[in-house]
Amino acid sequence: MIKPANLRHTDCVAIISPSGTIVPARVHGAVEAFKQWGFEPAVGTHTLSAHRSWGAVVTGGTDEERLADLKWAIAEPSIKAIFCSRGGYGTVRLLEHLDADLIRSNPKWLVGFSDISALHAAWHRAGVMSMHASMAKQLTEFGTEGEVSEAMHAILTTDAWPSYKVMPHPFNRKGEASGMIVGGNLAVLSALVGTDYNMLKGDVILFIEDVGEEIYRVERLLYQLRLAGVLPSLRGLIVGQFTRYHLNGELVSTSTDHQRQLYSMIAAMVEPYDYPVAFDFPIGHVDRNLPLVEGATAHLTVDGEVHLTFGK
């Protein structure tokens, strides 16, 4: 896997919307945060656009507009990192139009999560590392200070990547694992199984998160991974945040009881295997969404506390 070059002072960072449409104030907030870091932000031509298709789906411009912004950000030599404004839906529509050679010959950091997991799959297919991390909302609300933003900056600019320590969880399974770390939004990545963009393969440390999925839907996705041979052959599993779910037709915040039931189901799904499992890791649709480097070598230790460190 190719590690993108470290960003330097005054380097250009593109802000694009390859998925859903974004509130302009959040893009403005991200622009100010990048300026505070000393970077030169470049907002894509269609970053603030909106296009409605198939009823409730509103993307950041048409497929052609979002693809144009993405290809511009990849190919433009002055741009050293690509920052996605938000998730939503629509990124999968762009995959078949992306050239892996274009990404590989212009290796630069891709930053985002949620629906952006589909683009992480494209970077992975091209053999380039990427960063699963928060987007414009986090930078707007919390700025450049704090654990999440500072970890993101460290990954972008240094070889001294952060290491993480997380409190114990009763469903954790002890053990140690080393290997490539990949993952992201479970529903998005599961939909790519059986394609050239499949990241969910064995012999890796896998991390998963999701939003708005009921327990039975998460179980169905995990059965797909079990039957595909993924769950039995992992080196380790990191279970992130599964926030919000549908109750009586309404999208509600995850309760303690709902989370316990969901984690209990996941624990039962992986009970036959002997690799370490870390639950309630701070990744996903939460304020403390710790940045993870897709495609990097990682070491996971689950023994009371959970420790996660990265290699290059």
Image (cartoon, helix red, strand yellow):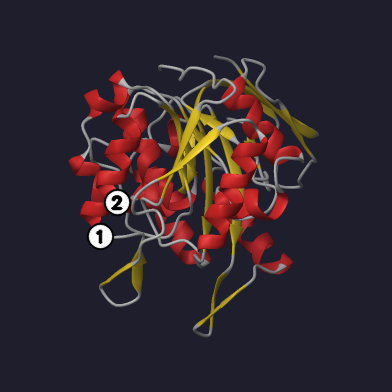
Q: Nearer the viewer, residue 35 or 142?
A: 35
- Number of other residues with Cα within 10 Å of mark 1, as a class: few under 14, some 14 to 19, many 20 or more: some
**In the image, is 285 to the left or to the right of 43?**
right
Contact flag, marks 1 and 2 (Cβ < 8 Å): yes
Name the image quarter holding residue 25: bottom right
Q: In the orientation shown, which residue stands out farthest toward the bottom?
A: 248
Q: Is residue 173 visible?
A: no
Is 130 located above or below residue 266 in the figure?
above
Q: Point out the image quarter for the C terminus.
A: top right
The residue beneath circle 1 is: 62
Q: Element type at marker 1?
A: loop
Q: Point out the image quarter for the N terminus.
A: top left
Q: Nearer the viewer, residue 142 or 257?
A: 142
The residue beneath circle 2 is: 66
Residue 79 lies, in percent from the top left, at: 41, 29
- Number of other residues with Cα within 10 Å of mark 2, as a class: few under 14, some 14 to 19, many 20 or more: many
Is 286 located above or below residue 184 in the figure?
below
| Alpha carbons under labels 1 and 2: distance apart | 6 Å
